[in-house]
Amino acid sequence: MDLSYSAEEIAFRDEVRAFLAENLPAHISDAVRAGGELDKATMEEWHAILNSKGWLATIWPKEFGGPGWSPVQKHIFDEECNRAYAPRIVPFGLGMLGPVLQKFGTKAQQDHYLPRILDGTDWWCQGYSEPGAGSDLASLKTRAVREGDEWVINGQKTWTTLGQHADWIFCLCRTDPEAKQQEGISFILVDLKTPGIEMRPIKLIEGGHEVNEVFFTDVRVPYGNLVGQENKGWTIAKYLLTHERTGIAGVGASMQALEEVKALARQVRRGGKPLIEDPLFAARIARAEIDLEAMKITNLRMLFQAQQQGAPGPETSILKIKGTVINQELNDLARRALGPAAAPFPGFVNDGNLMFGPPDTAHSAATYFNNRKTSIFGGSNEIQRNILTKTMLEL
């Protein structure tokens, strides 16, 4: 019995495992295990399966169509999905915009957009970062000027993840250029089919295409697409980012990655012995496991706090820092264990009489390079340390 969970929580875990075993299609879990990019149709298929069960919007309360889970249930669900190689739920509509609309949106906005997020009618992407405004997000320059009942938007966003699949984008725009940086920003919803929008792909270091540049040229948007008050978008931006940073921690994904590294280290032999018996390599695994267990407990504590207060606090920066560092360390351990076999090519590797190289190990180098981004996006780890210093230590 797992002593970290109550009897009720263990029963819930068993329910999740049974659901995944029966309903997660093999072609989807195989694609996730192989480490490649999933197409939109595959992600939509999995979202629809979860939505039919009422388990798609895992952090939404019941009144908005979510399951109303406790923080521990949410953690268990994420843990089991990673163990089963289920796709990550695309977070932009469900984990970011949804909570924003529930807190800051009008009743009309909630009634219109939330059901369309749940049923997959609208896919969303995030319009925050700009070429000169990444971690220093408040310096953004994309302008939205009001003309009658419309906003006219001009500017550029970058690193727009999965924008090529999206129908809508939620954007931070400067609506009062005379105000202080944080006080002249508004949160506006934009239909990507609107004339004047161009999306260009950005190829990543490992060859994938998951991020984009988005250009706005005289894009006209209804004034009613403003969420919250005009020039008060920075409050919404911070609220959204706390949800994003909690998700970036990726506790469940790192737990699965740790087990894969351990299994790999038992298979690979160096100097006639399994790599896991190498003192230096074993020490790195042990340190990652200790840090991961500590982060798991911290994550649960912060989820409980979020449930009571309605949103995570600035301490989510701890999760963002530690989660990305642990994730990158596990990627590096897998890459080092495989050596040249980590290169992103199909097939197997023959190490003496030992053959290894299940589908997921064939992409170890690509995963390693791709995840260099995690300590930068969502607010770089350096910026997160500044946030902790200012808001929690009051320095």
Image (tube, grey):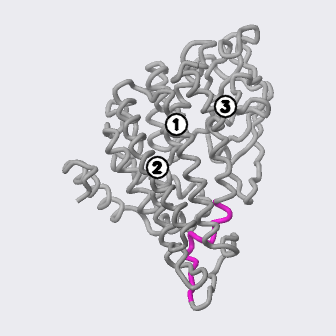
Is residue 347 on the magenta stretch?
no
Is residue 357 on the magenta stretch?
yes
Q: Nearer the viewer, residue 370 or 26?
A: 370
Going 69% across and 69% down the picture, which residue do you hit?
344
Task: Please identify the quarter of the rendering in which residue 64 is found.
Answer: top left
Q: In this figure, which residue is indicated by the disc labeled 2?
A: 251
Q: Amino acid at mark 3?
A: Tyr
Q: Which residues are magenta?
A: 354-367
Residue 205's place in the image compared with 361, above or below, is above
Furthest residue in direction top, as rendered: 178
Earlier along the polypeptide chain: callout 2 or callout 3?
3
Whether residues under marks 3 and 1 lie with C-beta atoms below 8 angstroms apart, the answer is: no
* The N terminus - image quarter: bottom left
Q: How many marks?
A: 3
Going 61% across and 19% down the picture, which residue do you hit?
234
Q: In this figure, which residue is indicated by the disc labeled 3?
A: 128
Q: Amino acid at mark 1?
A: Ile
The secondary structure type at the circle numbered 3 is loop
Q: How dense is the environment of label 2, judged by Cα within 10 Å: few (below 14), some, or many (20 and up)?
A: many
Going 29% across and 54% down the picture, which residue do you hit?
13
Q: In this figure, which residue is indicated by the disc labeled 1?
A: 318
Residue 79's place in the image compared with 139, above or below, is below
249 sits to left or right of 372? left
Going 60% across and 57% down the picture, which residue do you hit?
39
Circle 3 or circle 1, nearest the eye: 1
Q: Position of residue 327 (x, y in %)?
A: 56, 53
Q: Position of residue 119 (x, y in %)?
A: 45, 43
Task: Please identify the quarter of the rendering in which residue 281 is found.
Answer: bottom right
* The C terminus - image quarter: top right
147 sits to left or right of 28? right
